[in-house]
Image: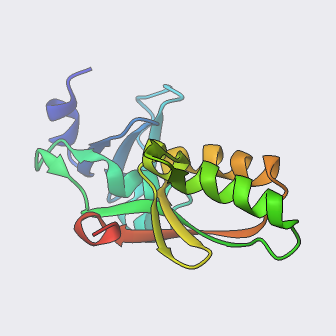
């Protein structure tokens, strides 16, 4: 499929390529020429409310030859160790942050501790951190957020 030719068709504002799908941004009704399940048609008026907005923001624009946004999807975790025994708290902390020169899970996943009981991580590694919290019986709350790339983990 020639994406540049597709992007140049009347009624098509742009074509966005992401890891998950090919988004065709339209100004009118969905064209009937495609039946590919990986092609998602999005009317430009519905773009900011689309369920796949985080993926769309990470997509590359065919017309502009650059990423749609500098925004990136992150997950902000707030966690509490109050319900754990002292030895479990120490085990958890060493595994999360590292100890004795060994790297912890935060380093391995590229996550950042931004305060007491608060961690931010890119969405792609969030499931691993969630599993880690679950394995250690840690109480947590996760929030999906969008932030500019450069400001996320400075």
Q: What residue is shown at x 29% (from left), y 45% (from top)?
A: 16
- Describe residue 73's horizontal placement relative to residue 138 as left or right: left
Q: Does residue 149 appear left or right of residue 131 in this picture?
A: left
What residue is at 80 percent from the left and 52 percent from the top? 136
The location of residue 46, given as percent across then percent down, is: 46, 67
Out of 123 and 3, give the one closest to the viewer. 123
The residue at the far front in this view is 100
Q: 146 or 129: nearer the eye?
A: 129
The x and y percentages for residue 151 are: 27, 72
Vertical side of 100 occupied by 33: above or below: above
Colour mode of the rendering: rainbow
Q: Compared with residue 54, is residue 105 higher up or lower down, i.e. above or below?
A: above
| Figure check: 9 above or below 28 | above
Q: Quadrant of the N terminus?
A: top left
- The residue under the point 54% across, 29% down is 37
Q: Is residue 92 left or right of residue 94?
A: right
| Frontmost residue, 75 versus 79 | 79
Q: Position of residue 35 (x, y in %)?
A: 50, 26
Residue 7, above or below 38: below
Furthest-top residue in this view = 1
Query: Could you say where residue 108 lies in the image, as x and y percent from the top left?
Result: 46, 42
Task: Kindly tell me whether residue 20 is visible in this rendering.
Answer: yes
**Quadrant of the snapshot with the C terminus:** bottom left
The foreground one among 141 and 22 is: 141
Which residue does the image show at 25% across and 62% down from the upper left?
69
Q: Is residue 53 visible?
A: no
């Amino acid at each position: 499929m020639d994406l540049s030719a597709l992007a140049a068709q009347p009624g098509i504002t742009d074509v966005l390529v992401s890891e998950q799908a090919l988004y065709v941004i339209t100004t009118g009704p969905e064209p009937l020429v495609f039946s590919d399940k990986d092609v998602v048609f999005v009317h430009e008026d519905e773009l900011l409310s689309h369920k796949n907005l985080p993926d769309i923001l990470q997509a590359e624009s065919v017309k502009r030859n650059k990423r749609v946004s500098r925004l990136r999807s992150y997950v902000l975790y707030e966690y509490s160790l109050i319900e754990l025994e002292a030895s479990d708290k120490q085990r958890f902390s060493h595994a999360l942050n590292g100890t004795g020169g060994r790297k912890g899970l935060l380093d391995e996943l590229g996550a950042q501790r931004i305060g007491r009981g608060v961690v931010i991580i890119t969405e792609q590694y969030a499931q691993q951190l969630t599993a880690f919290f679950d394995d250690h019986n840690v109480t947590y709350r996760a929030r999906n957020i969008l932030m500019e790339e450069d400001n996320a983990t400075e």
